[in-house]
Amino acid sequence: MKRSGITSRWQSRNFIPFAFASTVDHMVAASLGEWTAPKLVSALRGQRVAEDYRIVLKYDGKGSQGFAWWQVTDASTGEVLLSGIEDASLTDPVSVPASQSLANRLARTLVGTRGVINTIETLHALDAPSLGNGCILRAIKAGDRSDEAGMADARNCLEQTLAIAPNDAGAKAELAIVLLAKDPIEAPTDASDRAYRLAADAVKLSPFSDRSKYALMTSQFRSGQMQAAIQTGYAAMALNPNNSDIAARLGLYLFTAGRWEEGTGLAVRSAWMDQNSASDGLLTRALDAYRLGRFEDALALSKQLKISGDYVAHAVQAAAAGQLGRTDDARLALASLGAGRADFDVAFRKNMSARYFAPEMTDLLEIGVMKATPQKS
C-alpha cells in the first residue's frame, strides 16, 4: 500500500478550475486564472478580503482499488472547512485511465462550478453581498434554483460590476447568461442581441475561460447559429472537460439538431459528473427516452425537472403522459403549453421551431401531446 499527499493553496478570487493530474505516488493540481489589480479587487469585494484555501489530498490503495481523502482548510486560521473521500474504483463512462477519472472527480468536487470552494464562497456572497465574483456566484445559484428575484438581483449586481470594471470577462459572460435566461425565446428582444455582444467580448478578453465560451455557445444557439454553437461548445469542453454544465447544454443542442446518440451521450456523462448539474442533461435524457418509446422512463425523468418555465419540459411530460393515457399527469403540463386553444397545433409547432428542434422530434411529441389533450365533444 502506498500513501501520498500534497498541500496546495488556492486563491478564491477569479478562480477557474482546469484539471488535476495524478499518479499513485504523486498528485498535483493545475489551474488557469485571471490576474486582477489588487485595488480593483478591493473595490469589487467591498470590505471582505479574498481568502486563501489549503487543500490536502491523500491517496490510499493500489491502482484503481483505493480511495482519495481530501480536506479543505482556511489557510490563514487552519480551520477545517470540509473533508471527504472519493472512491477510486468508480469509472468514467468515457474511456479514460482510472487515475485520470479519479483526478477529474477530485477537480469537480473541490474546484468545480458547484464544488467545495465555490460553495463556501457562494455562502459568503449570500451572507455579505459584494460586486465582482460575488455577483457571478449568486447568479449561478439563482439560475440553479430558477429564482427570478435572485436573477434580477444578480443582473443588477453584474451591471454595477461592469460599470466599475467594463473589461471584466467573468461579469460579461455571466450577464449574458442571465439576460438569455430571462429573454423569451419565442419573442426575443434587444436583450438577446446584447447578450451575444457581451459573450463575444468575454471570449475576446478571456479566450481560455470555459464559462465565457459557454455564454457564447448559448448566445449563438439562441440567435440561430446552431453549427457555430456546437463548435463553440466542443471548444469549451476542450478547455474544461470537467464542466458538467457545458456537457449538459451541448448535449441538449446536439439532440435538438437531431444528433440523438451524440447528445444523449453527453447528457449521460453530465449526470455522471454532477448529479446536481443543470437540468439540460435531464431534459435530453427524457426526450431520448420518449423518442425510443420508453414512455414510463420519459415521464419519470420529466417529473424530476424544474419545469415551471420550460416549454419543452412541459411538452415531453404531456406527451409521455398522453402516450400512457395518464390524464392527471398531463393536466398541468397541458395548461402551461396552452393546449385547448383553437390554434394550439400551429402554436406548438411554432414554439418548437423557435427552439430549433428537428421536425422529426416535434412530430413525435405532437402525437403524444394531442393524445393527452381532452377532445371536445
Image: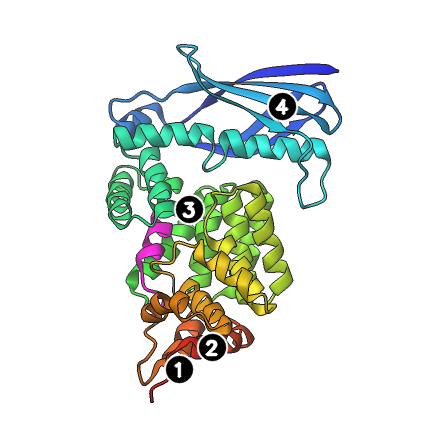
Q: CA distance from mark 3 to mark 2?
A: 39 Å
Find disc 3 in the rendering and name its residue.
202
**Stretch of the chain drawn in magenta:** 174-187
Distance between the alpha carbons at the discs numbered 4 and 2: 49 Å
* Label 2: element kind: helix
* Residue marked by disc 2: 366
**Are the residues at dot 4 and dot 2 in contact (C-beta closer than 8 Å)?**
no
**Mark 3 or 4, which is nearer the eye?**
4
Residue 236 located within the stretch drawn in magenta: no
Quadrant in which the C terminus appears: bottom left
Q: Is residue 369 above or below residue 289?
A: below
Q: Amino acid at mark 2?
A: Glu
Whether residue 1 appears in this view of the structure is yes
Pointer 4 residue:
68
Give the residue type that dot 1 points to. Asp
Q: Nearer the viewer, residue 127 or 324?
A: 324
